[in-house]
Amino acid sequence: MTPSSGKYADFEGLRERAVALRRGGHGLRRIGDELGVRDKDVLSRLVKGEAPPEWTKRPRAKDDLRERARALRLQGWTYDRIRAELGCSKSSVSLWVRDLPRPEPTCTPEERQARMNAGLARLHAARDQERRAAKQAAAEAVGALSDREPYLAGVALYWAEGTKDKPHARRQSVEFVNSDPGVIGVFLAWLDLLGVGRDRLHCRVVIHDSADVAAAERHWADLVGRERSDLGRTVLKRYGPKTVRKNTGESYRGCLGIEVRRGADLYRRVEGAWYGIVGAVLPGDASNRT
């Protein structure tokens, strides 16, 4: 039904009354009650062009934040500082203050770089502390170990890093190479647990030819508890002039290779123990059994 037909045939008369009520400060609901009009579309047409009273305008939730942001920007605050102060997004700050002039720098480029470096240093220090705390908590959670835990750990460690028997190459020997002194130490403790004497170990260093070979040999000999002269011939790795290496510096000691003499029986025990672990975790899985 159009405003000019039916019950709203006297539309112009209704409009005059509606405009008068609107200018008197009444809202649409009151105007509708006074005129007996319930159709929202018709009410809108009756007061078209008339501004609503101030009391009917809903305040914008962020108007106060916007004004505070503008005031802070005029004081020379940066976007990030305003964002942190008001707890709003940086995009909102930009929208509110982008028409204002950019504040003059309060420090030199060198001072800004120094502040940034100091901030990064604080961030890195906090992250380092967090990492150390997490590692310390994990280390303390390990607690005391029985012989079983190092035994199983050693089996898994050997199967990850040691030489393994293949159907096409029946070696059945125990050979282990690693560059981490902690890993070598755990491996040696595992061999002690299995009753393998140090006299059965043949050890030799594997290292890049440009490193301090003598220092590396002393390092690994001390770790194994042997004389430097007891080590086998060091294997030197040579690379071309275009090779970019990251493992350099005084801390680089290459790798230590350990071979257990007369180790065939030990290898079979290790392989069997490994498949025992696999079978306990994945019952019925006989894949890769050699």
Image (tube, grey):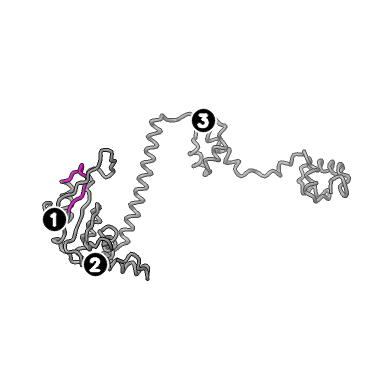
Q: Which mark is residue 226?
A: 1
289 with respect to 229 (left or right): right
Foreground label between 3 and 2: 2
The three-letter code of the residue at mark 3 reads Arg
Q: Secondary structure at mark 3?
A: loop
Pick the residue in front: 249 or 160: 160
Q: Secondary structure at mark 1?
A: loop
Q: CA distance from mark 3 to mark 2?
A: 75 Å
Q: CA distance from mark 1 to mark 2?
A: 27 Å
Residue drawn at x 63%, y 43% is 60
Residue drawn at x 38%, y 44% is 123
Q: Which mark is residue 102?
A: 3
Q: Which residue is mark 2?
A: 268
> Residue 64, how many percent across, how many down?
59, 41
Q: Disc 1, disc 2: CB below 8 Å?
A: no
Magenta segment: 204-213
Q: Secondary structure at mark 2?
A: helix
The three-letter code of the residue at mark 2 reads Arg
Residue 92 picture quarter: top right
Q: Which mark is residue 241?
A: none
> Residue 257, how many percent across, how many down?
20, 54
Q: Is residue 216 magenta?
A: no
Foreground label between 1 and 3: 1
> Residue 108, how many percent across, how many down?
41, 29
Query: Considering only order in the chain, which callout, 2 or 3, is on the residue closer to the N terminus?
Result: 3
Q: Residue furthest bottom?
A: 284
Residue 124 picture quarter: top left
**Quarter holding the C terminus?**
bottom left
Q: Badge 2 local density, few (<14 within 10 Å), some, or many (20+)?
A: some
205 with respect to 121 (left or right): left
Query: Considering only order in the chain, which callout, 3 or 1, is on the residue closer to the N terminus?
Result: 3
